[in-house]
Each structure stands twice: as structure tokens, then as C-alpha cells.
Image (spheres, rainbow, N blue to C red):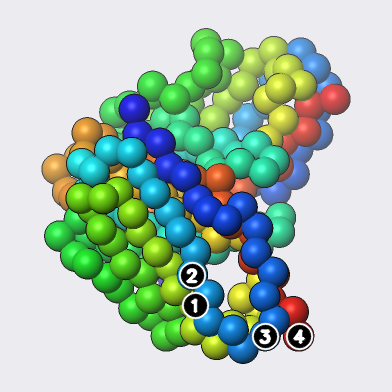
Amino acid sequence: GAGVSQTPSNKVTEKGKYVELRCDPISGHTALYWYRQSLGQGPEFLIYFQGTGAADDSGLPNDRFFAVRPEGSVSTLKIQRTERGDSAVYLCASSPRGAGGSYNEQFFGPGTRLTVL
Amino acid sequence: KQEVTQIPAALSVPEGENLVLNCSFTDSAIYNLQWFRQDPGKGLTSLLLIQSSQREQTSGRLNASLDKSSGRSTLYIAASQPGDSATYLCAVRPGYGNKLVFGAGTILRVKS
């Protein structure tokens, strides 16, 4: 079956613009995660969804970042008033279940490389 | 706060060598630990997942061990090949949440 997909693969924008990044999880996976990876670093957690609700958004760096998952499948990460420091690879992952289960392998998408000029 | 450290940061070995990558974490209260591979410009591929109750997992030429009490994991790669060249990331799932906490990775180069 298909894995996690993310679009676009690359996004170049200008400082101050608004961007949306999309994630399609593996079919049937109820848990969805967003991470951000800066050059030379490991991914850092941003937000976790269980179904339609954001169960943990403690990793969002500030209120310019927002994510939704209205139907419990596809998720969109939204960044307002982009800054050069937002440039990174944004990774999405999904797992079969989240809260209450302890053995949840996360499967990652290819990422979206965001460049803010 | 859980922190994950990977040593070495980079490693270059000749083809055929056996090698060990190290991962340490500061809080032993974890649900599981995953090793990932990342090729340049690509996403993460899960290699092995070790549950907190397990000591090791094996897949082909890869073997990962977990010593939860000491906060350590190792990834052993046998008979390395040039195709193994990639960045290897270690990540733990803390006992208090669902997110993964990653190390910065080990960049591996296997020379033919």
C-alpha cells in the first residue's frame, strides 16, 4: 500500500508570506505527527493529532504555526508571516494508533523542504 | 526533559567492516526506541523498533540493542556495504507522550 505522502516536495517563498504544507497519512492510521528538521539536526516534534483533534501541540514554536486535520485523515500545516528561520524540512509521520497504545511505530513521509528567502 | 545523543557524529569505514553506532538518552522511562535511516534529501526509513521490554531486535545485517536502565542503545551493522551510506537517526518515545525525541544522527560513509 501507499506510504505517507507530502506535498509539495519543495516550497520557496518570500519572507512574510503564508504557506500551507499537506500530509496524506497511511490509510487507516489514526495518529499523525508533524516534525521539523533543520540542517544537520534530528527532527523536532511540532504537533500530534489523534483523529481530528490536536492531542499535543507543545512543539509549535509560536502562534504563526497552526495545523488542522478536519476529517481525521489529511493534515495541513499552516505557517503565517514566514521568517527566514522557518526554513527547514517539514516531516509528517503516521502510526496506527496513538494514545493508550505503547507500541506504535511511526512511518515518515519524504518531507517538504521549505525555503524562506 | 528527554535528550538523545548519538556518537560518533560521522564515521567512514571501508567496505566489509562491522560497525557500531551509539545512542544514549537521559531519561530511562521510555515506551520504545527506533532506529531510522535517512538518505540525502529524503525522508526517514524505519529500520528497527525496540519495545521498552525488549533487549534487542534484528533485521538482516542490522542488530539493535537496548539497555534501558543505562539509557543506551547500539546499532550494529555487519559486513557494511557502500549502499549503507546514509545518516542513521536514533529516536526514543518518552513514557509521558506520543512524540519521538531524536538524536542529531550519525553520518555513515562506507567506502568501496
* Residue underneath mark 4: B112
Label 1, residues with CA under 10 Å away: few <14, some 14-19, many ≥20:
many
Identify which amino acid the numbered label 3 is placed on: Glu
Instruction: Measure how far apart labels 2 and 3 are at the Cα level.
Output: 14 Å
Q: Are marks 4 and 2 in contact (CB under 8 Å)?
A: no
Q: In screen coordinates, is A113 left or right of B9? A: right
The circle drawn on residue B15 is 3
Q: In screen coordinates, is A112 left or right of B46? A: right
Chain letter of mark 3 equals B
* Residue underneath mark 2: B20
Q: Are marks 4 and 1 in contact (CB under 8 Å)?
A: no
Identify which amino acid the numbered label 4 is placed on: Ser
**Discs 4, 2: same chain:** yes
Residue A51 falls in image quadrant: top left
Residue A64 falls in image quadrant: top right
The circle drawn on residue B30 is none
Q: In screen coordinates, is A89 left or right of A59? A: right
Q: Is residue A38 above or below residue A17?
A: below
